[in-house]
Image: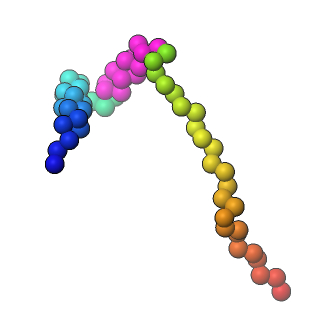
């Protein structure tokens, strides 16, 4: 079963790729320029720091 939303996103992505003849550098440059036009509408999330797991303790060294 094909998802119509996924199909539409893929179509627009392919159109955008063909516009720049599959040149990844130009595609990324265009996307960065577009991001600058968004202003405050662009959301940047802070990275979440993961806490060390206390569930498992490290193996102890064997002493002799």
Q: Which residues are magenta?
A: 26-39
- Residue 15 at x, y percent in the picture: 19, 27
Q: Residue at x 66, y 51 (%)?
A: 51
Snapshot quadrant of residue 36: top left
Q: Is residue 10 left or right of residue 31?
A: left
Res. 62 visible in picture: yes
**Residue placed most toward the observer, 28 or 23:** 28
Q: Quadrant of the C terminus?
A: bottom right
Q: Is residue 1 left or right of residue 55?
A: left
Q: Is residue 30 above or below residue 62?
A: above
Query: What's the colour scheme?
Result: rainbow
- Residue 59 at x, y percent in the picture: 70, 73
Q: Is residue 29 above or below residue 4?
A: above
Q: Main secondary structure of the magenta part?
A: helix
Spot the residue most to the bottom. 64
Spot the residue most to the right. 64
Snapshot quadrant of residue 30: top left
**Residue placed most toward the observer, 41 or 14:** 41
Q: Residue at x 20, y 32 (%)?
A: 8
Would you say residue 34 sits in the magenta stretch?
yes
Q: Residue at x 67, y 67 (%)?
A: 56
Res. 7 visible in picture: no
The tally of labels here is 0
Snapshot quadrant of residue 34: top left
Q: Is residue 38 above or below residue 27?
A: above
Q: Is residue 53 left or right of residue 21?
A: right
């Amino acid at each position: 079963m094909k998802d119509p939303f996924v199909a539409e996103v893929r179509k627009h992505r392919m159109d955008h790729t063909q516009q720049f003849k599959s040149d990844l550098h130009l595609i990324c440059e265009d996307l960065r320029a577009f991001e600058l036009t968004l202003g405050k509408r662009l959301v940047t999330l802070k990275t979440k720091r993961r806490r060390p797991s206390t569930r498992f303790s490290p193996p102890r060294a064997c002493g002799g």
